[in-house]
Image (cartoon, grey):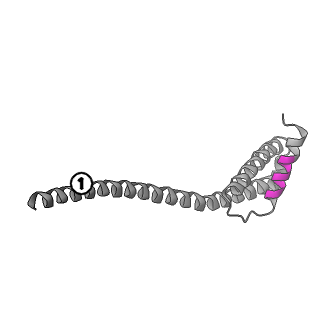
């Protein structure tokens, strides 16, 4: 049930994936993965149909399906780099937040110590 315009956009995205994706942009990689996944599903249905009606002709569709699966695995591996960077960034941000909290606590303690030292200095004078 897609509208013709949506089908046309989808076909354009799928055609774009036909050229090997070389981007490091995670959104483009995810789009390529989705497109490949759709192609794999279509290829699988076609392979099933061919196996039922012309089993001897299934080799070509099986090769197509294998190539699509290999490309999807390549895209998954490329996306892992992005995930690793995101995890590292999140970890570093958490460490920074914790260090800032500790620094504020130390600044508070330092203020208390300075006030106590001033009180002692006044008391001793």
Magenta residue check for 10: yes
Residue 43, given in percent of the width and then of the height, sits at 79, 48
Name the quarter where the N terminus is drawn.
Answer: top right
Instruction: Report the front residue among 69 and 96.
Output: 96
Magenta residue check for 64: no
In this view, which residue lies farthest toward the left? 124
Instruction: Report the front residue among 42 and 22.
Output: 22
Name the quarter where the C terminus is drawn.
Answer: bottom left
Residue 13, given in percent of the width and then of the height, sits at 81, 52
Q: Secondary structure at mark 1?
A: helix
Magenta highlight range: 9-17
Residue 12, given in percent of the width and then of the height, sits at 85, 52
Q: Quadrant of residue 83?
A: bottom right
In this view, which residue lies farthest toward the top? 1
Q: Which residue is mark 1?
A: 112
Magenta stretch: dominant SS? helix
In this view, which residue lies farthest toward the bottom? 22
Please indicate, yes or no, whether residue 96 appears anywhere in the rendered image: yes
Q: Quadrant of residue 64?
A: bottom right
Q: Quadrant of residue 116?
A: bottom left
At horizontal 69% and vertical 57% (from top left) the residue drawn is 29
Instruction: Report the front residue among 32 and 90.
Output: 90
Please indicate, yes or no, whether residue 69 appears anywhere in the rendered image: no
At horizontal 72% and vertical 56% (from top left) the residue drawn is 28
At horizontal 29% and vertical 54% (from top left) the residue drawn is 108
Count of picture labels:
1
Residue 62, given in percent of the width and then of the height, sits at 77, 53
In this view, which residue lies farthest toward the right? 4
């Amino acid at each position: 049930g897609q509208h013709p315009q949506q089908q046309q956009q989808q076909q354009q995205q799928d055609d774009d994936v036909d050229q090997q994706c070389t981007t490091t942009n995670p959104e483009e990689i995810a789009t390529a993965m989705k497109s490949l996944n759709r192609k794999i599903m279509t290829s699988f249905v076609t392979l099933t149909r061919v196996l039922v009606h012309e089993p001897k002709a299934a080799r070509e569709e099986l090769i197509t399906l294998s190539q699509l699966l290999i490309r999807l695995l390549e895209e998954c591996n490329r996306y892992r780099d992005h995930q690793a960077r995101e995890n590292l960034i999140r970890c570093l941000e958490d460490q920074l937040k914790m260090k800032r909290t500790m620094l504020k606590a130390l600044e508070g303690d330092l203020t208390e110590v300075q006030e106590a030292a001033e009180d002692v200095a006044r008391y001793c004078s």
